[in-house]
Image: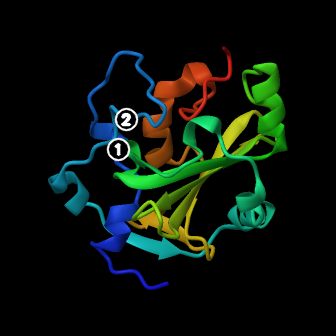
Amino acid sequence: MHFKRGSILLAFSLAACGGKAKEPDSRAVEHAGSGAMSGDMAMQMKMGMAAPSADSQTLLAKVSSYATWPKFAENSEPKASRAHMNMYVVTFHNDVVTAAIAAHTLPLPDGAVIVKQNKMKADAPPQTLTIMSKQGGKWFWLDATPDGKVVTINDMPQEGFGAPMCTKCHDDASNNDYVFTHSFAK
């Protein structure tokens, strides 16, 4: 896979939600109201790739078979996500999340893993994977390519607890354990 700085990389990066307008608690399935990035803001970001940290390598190995996992019913087919730069997304979850869905469990327990494919077109292969992994009661965030490179923004790898590009958006879903795709407490 070859990437061109400023074109494909920019197109599949996560939206810079820090500049978004707040909206009333209308958490659409794909958090459609926020995350639209202005061209000026997007062009100010320097996109790149980095080797994953040891924690990210472990997580990438753990999710290597994610495509065999169940998909969230709300996001089982590719759909454009404004919060993910209008990429087409499909979201998978592991068995810990499956049990939480059945039991309407919040917060999600340790071991919960959610993997979102980010695609340029609905029928295209994923350009990046956005991964949330619950560890020690907190979310570990990772934005990586399918071959294991970590997306960087302004030389900052998008991985770890509190990864700013992730948390700036997902803080809006704190009442649903920072998850937009599915409402667990129905």
Q: Quick check: can you spot residue 110?
A: no
| Of callouts 2 and 1, the N-terminal one | 2
**Labels 2 and 1 touching (C-beta < 8 A):** yes
Vertical placement of residue 136 versus 116, above or below: above
Pointer 1 residue: 82
Here the colouring is rainbow
- Give left or right: position of 39 versus 167: left
Measure the alpha-carbon separation of dots 2 and 1.
5 Å
Give how far across and how far down residue 23 sits, in percent: 32, 21
Left or right of 70 in this view: 81:
left
What residue sits right under mark 2 in the picture?
32
Q: In the figure, is residue 22 to the left or right of 96?
A: left
User: Who is closer to the viewer here, 148 or 118?
Assistant: 118
For disc 2, the neighbor class at 10 Å (few under 14, some 14 to 19, many from 20) is some
Where does the C terminus fall, quadrant-wise? top right
Q: Quadrant of residue 81?
A: top left
Which residue is at a point 34% across and 47% down the rendered structure image? Answer: 16
- Name the residue at 26% across, 47% down: 37
Mark 1 residue type: Arg
Q: Residue at x 53, y 48 (%)?
A: 163
Expressed as whole percent of the image width and height from the top left, the position of residue 132 reads: 64, 46
Residue 63: give x, y in percent of width and height.
75, 60
